Image (cartoon, helix red, strand yellow):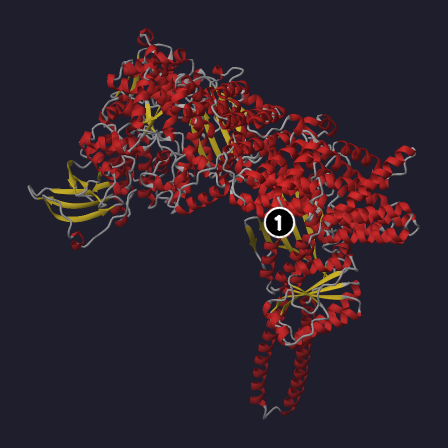
Amino acid sequence: MSAEPIHRAADDVQGVSFEGFTALTPIYEGAETLVFRGARIADGARVVLKQTKNEYPTVREVGRLRREFTILRELGVECAPEALALEEHGRGVVLIMADIGHPTLREILESRKLDIETALTIALSITNALAAVHRKGILHKDLTPRNVLIEASTWTAHLIDFGISARISRELHAPTGPRSLEGTLLYMAPEQTGRMNRAVDSRTDLYSLGVILYEMLTGSVPFPQRELAEIVQSHLTRPPVPPHEVVPAVPPPLSDLVMTLLAKTPEERYQSDAGVRADLSECLRQWKASGTITPFPLRQHDKAPELRRAQRLYGRDHDIEALLQAFGRARARGPELCLVAGYSGVGKSALVHEIHKIIARHGGGFFAAGKFDQISRDVPLAPVVQALRELVQQILTEPPETLAAYKNDLLTSLGGNGGLLVELVPELELVLGPQPKVSDLPPDQAKNRFELTLQNFLHVFASEAHPLVIFLDDLQWMDPASQRLLHLLLTDAFSRHLLIIGAYRDNEVSPGHPLSTLLDELASSGFSPARIHLAPLDRDMVGSLVADTLTSKPEEVQTLADLVYEKTQGNPFFAHQFMVALYERGLLRFDPEGGAWQWDDTAIRAANVTDNVVDLMVGVLRRLSSETQHVLERAACIGHSFDFGSLATIAEKPATEVSAALWEALRAGLVVSLDGDYRYLEAGLGGGARELAASLFNVRYQFVHDRVLSAAYTLVEPEQRKQLHLSIGRLLRKRSGERPRDDELLDLVHHLNLGAAAITDRAERLDLAEINLRAGQRAKAATAYHAGAIYTRAGIDLLDVTDWDEHDDLCFSLYIEGGQNAYLSGDAAGAEALFLELLRRAKTDVERATVQRQRIYNNVSHGRFVEAVQTGSETLAFLGHPLSMEELGSPAVMMSELEQLTTNLRGRRILDLADAPEASDPVVRSVLSILDAISDSAHHLNPIVFSVINFRAVNVGLVHGHTELCPFPYACVGYVLAGMFGRVNEGMEFCKLAEDINKKCPSAMQLSRLHIPWGSCAHMQHPMRKANENWAVARQKGLETGEYYMIGTACFLETMGNVFAGNLIEELVEEAEKHLAIVRRTRMPANLATMTVVRQTVACLAGKTRDRTSLDDETFHEKEFVSRLDDEHFGNAKIHHAILKTLVCLIHGQYEDAWTWSEAAERSLGFAGGNLASKVHPCLRALVLLGLPRAEAHEEAERRAEILHKCRAEITQLAAWSPKSFAHLEALVNAEAARTEGDLEGAIRLYERAITLCQENKAPHFEALAGELCAKFYLSIGAPTAGGGYMKNAYRAYAHWGAAPKVAALENEATHIWPSLREVSRTRGSSTTASSSASLATRTLLGQTSLGSLRDAALVVRAAQEIASEIDLPKVVDRLAKLVLDNAGADQGLLILARDGELLVEATFRPAGSTLDVGHGQPLEDVQACAKSVIHYVTRTLEPVVLDNPRKASRFSDDPYIQTLAPKSILCLPLLHQGRLSGALYLENRMTAGVFDVARVELLALLSSQAAIAIEIARLIENAHVANEQVKRANERLEMEVAHRTEELRRVNDSLFDMNQALEMELGQRREIEQERAALHEQVIAGQRQRLAELSTPLLPITKDIVVMPLIGTMDTERVEQVLSVALDGAQRLGARVVILDVTGVKHVDTQVAGMLVNVAAALRLLGSETVLTGIAPRIAQTLIALDVDLKSFVTMGTLQSGMEYALRRCRHVDLAPARRGGPHR
């Protein structure tokens, strides 16, 4: 970019000298160059010397000066400086030019304001200079006032600084960051940013001319912003203010001319220098003649003298709109797939690249593209990798702070797997830094790991603010690996804000094609892509294309357009190439004198111009030089895109000749460069310079179209192609050295394999076999298994029989890799054939075991679990550790292995085994690896097989030493011992041992695995929720290692465990949805089925299914689902479905159904092993049996009694092992048993114990069930009053748990059986339309436990403290605004205050902040942005209104605002203080219905009540200030009046004695009035003080038993008395059992305050209330201790929330032991 000029003193250049020059004066300093004026000693000529600035200049810096020298020499025009010489200077070069000697336009603009005539004269001169440059085929690309010299006497312009100029007529720019752009942003055309689907051409310079002219006329550039990104955005999307609107003196026609130059797209600008020159001349002529410019038609002479490729789209408006809609959907959510189909050359790629403008218009995003290639289509994932590299290259252009943020996000998202992607995208290491090598994993897990890593990588870049768009061109050549990856990205449950656009030739895609297969798979998943089909252009559109190409009007070129249409049938690419062919043959030419294009229809029809586009392009290529044809043939063999280095290698020509050939192809428009470094390889720069540049810059090129590529490839005779590819491969192999780099492998092997049949040298064949092995391994690492199988098969085909003797390792590896790639790509039979052949050639048992393990993986990968175990059994036999299939399924063998385990311990402590030595015997390690491989299959068979395998693995480890594969079997043994054999302590120690061994022999995969069995038995010793720690580790490490089975298992076990533990249903709903999304990502049917069951159970409990005990909803049909659960594949889902259904039916009292499901669970119990569900099952079973009526059949009754006895024994044992998990269930079962046995006293005692234990173990669901059963028990013995109390508590517990259907059922039941429950029901309800003001005033936050929360209660109290701490009304409103915006869920709202009977809008709330007009409120009737009818209703009835669908609310549906804008949700609350209206809070959400749920309304109602108090206080203070001011003014007036009258009396005193007496009387009256006024003032102040005191000690009811008094500020004697009075009065009036005094806001505590606290506590104790003191800061605690305050009279808690938790426990359970008194606060 251009820099600012500098002015140096003469001594600044001391030490700077150039041989042969003197009198040096610095005139400019840029980022890369220094410019001096001087004189040539030889002849005294004035010169300008431009040298590289840096002592060690880069090749680019030197190259720019070399190019500038070359360009100036080629130009040879008066409007540019003459290049005299280019000389070496130090390590750089110096460019010597003739000194023009004029100031820059920038200097002139800074020194004076130009008049219109001068501005026009200069602009016209610049246009002439540009025309001269453009005629030479040069684009300046950096036209700015600093690069224009002006001869002041004639206003003649000269152009300088051609360092970044282009020597071709059309140049493509890739998107890059603003800091990486070449040129000067303020003057840069939109297409130069690379963010438009447009090339840079001469019209780019005209845009810059428009900016200069704009600045000369207005004094400022159109977009003077400082931020680079903002400038770029402005050039792309924002229209400039027309000059005549900035400076009215600018004539509108001239303003229109400037705006035409500044058009965003080149097609809308002037098309030629001649057109600009003609209109500027006309403006100047009129201005000189009359001082005005009258309107005239612009662009009448605007025709370009050369063919110009039309860049805009024709007839595609509908398609662009479809693309925009797809982008919008991706932006809102995504993922989205948009397919663009059509014939080659129809404009698919051009249409898609319009997305650049869409992205820019919508504030940004990422765009990356890749292209499939017909010639190199066997290179897997090539276009995907190309897109990823482009994406990383984009972020490498970002500022350091942004790049650091991306680095942090990527490291977090990728975990330890960044190295996987660095292998594919080397540039990623520049962002992340060096990455550790990833660990080796089994094939399936490696595949999963790679896919998850790639998905997580893309998630970092895709966001709502910046969607990610990936364009993949030519999907008709898509490889299977890319097909699979696209399926993953589009069906990933976590994929968001991603748009994938695919273009393809629909005539080349048939059924069975990878794209067709992908679309079928997506359809089966319910995914439907957007489709755009591009048809050829119609005749009119072809006419427009031809007219734009010739910069003419359509009617002027109609006959030619008809000819083009007939030949090309509307194909845009073919149409352009056809016109180029006509132009090159002289059949189409420009007449400079007439200023028009000419052609001869007859001659064109007679000419033999082919109507086949490939033949046409072949003809174009054959007209090039033979050297260029040779180079393009080689380039076509590489593919659509290629780099200079590779091309130079395979062309076998010097770099200078290759660059010259490419330069010819560039100028012919057949290839384009993908970066700007091509300029340093241009012809004319000198051989040495180009050789150096070629060695340093690996410039990338691509063919301009596939048809050009096909034509270039066609130049090579078919029989020569294989030999040519072999030659290319050999050249690349020679260049690659001893070991080719990973990023070279696939290109290298592609060429060599095409010519492999011609390789006869054995060494070369072995080398290629090894390269194919590495290529197969690389393809496998990138999950491109189909390609990997092809590479390894090619390597195998190169082997000779004798190679097994001399190159055994290579042969063995090729077969292993080949087999793995085969079965991973779905070819199980092919893999098995390779493995069997390898078994035949294996030399040792260890080698055979290695092959057998791959056969096991092959079977597991295709779901053949029995065959996998059978293969493992065969392997163990020849390894000397036999385990037949019969033994694996034998309980006796399992017990024998268990006994052997005890023997092998040899008295050692289990935890000490972590220090035992590792196994070193290869055979033992093979045995353990086989046992590890088949343990996965054992999961799917039965627990006996699973146990035998893991017992055997542990026994081998105990005897021979462990390996890194031992932690999982150790943990499994622990699980079996604890969960299935009741040896809990041993089992838990084995689990801990597994963790210890894993720490010594780290393996992330083993870490994920071991936490599954550990978590599955944690409940045997710890609370149920303890296992969450295990599930979290298993899930995280599973995601890192691709352990899909473990991920899915952890997800469903965690969610199900939390259901059994009693987590709140609201939290469970969110957790279940998240975990289901994760499990869907794993695509494991068994785990998905079980997780679906758990999710539907949670939805049922929450009331989100069709019936309270049915799991059916809109997307799930339970009966159909259960019918598909066969034992072989879905036994796990079947057992857990039955147990969860038992729980649901039990909760709803449907005992017969619960028994049916319990029986079903019993039949499938073996699938649950010893996990938590299997332990909860007997508890539920016992409760169901005890709730059922006695069976009529004697045999059934006896059977049930036996079952009950067995269950109770098991429950007793479980409670002994883990009281935190099972003691409450034991007590409840015993209570129900006592009830059925008629033991009334025992039942009462046990029910109480069960409820208490449920509370201690935090099991609200079983607490609710126990309370309900206890209530019904009391009803059965004729004690409905006691039963009613328990039913109330049960009701509250169900509501707290969140079981909405059960709560509703109890409410319905209450109307008939529990009359006292109606009151509880009413307190929890909240109308969706209105409720009375009285109920609002007395509502408590935890009145409905299921909706209230301690967090919200603490929020309200803190809000009250914050609001109450302000006494200034504007600040009160500001605090309220922030609180509302943070907690309301609204997207806009109003705060309305009532003043003197009028409603005024005091604040407008919006998500970005609040706009306040406090104290000068706007009348409500003048405000449009609200539903006034709702506000009037609320302020008149003092009732709140909640509308979930305002249009359907008949009362308000006629409101004009609701009819027009249709907000989805409205909430309006009255602000009440002591029954009086203070105002109203109006909120709405225009996007989402049902935002204001009951909990949120309740929270906002309490916030509003506190706001009303605060507003009242602020108003009182405001009124007091007003009153004080009024009194002050009255005093001043009175004093002035008394002084005046006294003066009058003094003057007339001697003569007016009688008047003196009258005056004395008057003064006496005035004194009485003054006394009365003073008394009145004191009365007002006292009243206000009383009101303030009342409001400064707010008493907040949290429940009917709990109140909170937040204390704020300084406590004096008066405040202390007030606190005591309010606390006692409130406690007595409300009947509170607990009063919480929160002293967080108290600034200072002294003896007086401490005494007050003690007195309040003592007084409240007399009233039967308990005092809890919260919020004691350390300084206050020290003060209390120092004052020796007796703290025994109240409970102290550290925070308000902990105080509330204590108070809730006290109020619910009076028999709980009280908290510690008198000690340090918590």
**Residue at x 69% of width, y 61% of height:** 1699
Q: List x then y, in percent, for residue 1472.
A: 71, 58
Residue 246 position (above or below residue 1379)? above
Residue 374 position (above or below residue 1502)? above
Considering depth in this image, is 1095 or 205 the residue closer to the camera?
1095
Callout 1 environment at 10 Å: few (<14), some (14 to 19), or many (20+)?
A: many
Q: Quadrant of the C terminus?
A: bottom right
**Residue at x 66% of width, y 53% of height:** 1481
Residue 387 visible? The answer is yes
Considering depth in this image, is 642 or 1558 the residue closer to the camera?
642
Q: Label 1's element?
A: strand
Considering depth in this image, is 16 or 304 the residue closer to the camera?
16
Residue 1464 position (above or below residue 539)? below
Q: Quadrant of the N terminus?
A: top left
Q: List x then y, in percent, for residue 1339.
A: 75, 55
Residue 575 position (above or below residue 9)? above
Count up the numbered dots.
1
Along the horizontal axis of the image, is 618 left or right of 835?
left
Q: Name the kind of residue labelled 1 in the image.
A: Gly
Q: List x then y, in percent, for residue 1163.
A: 77, 31
- Figure quadrant of residue 1196: top right
Along the horizontal axis of the image, is 1410 left or right of 762?
right
For disc 1, the marked residue is: 1389
Q: List x then y, in percent, for residue 283.
A: 30, 35
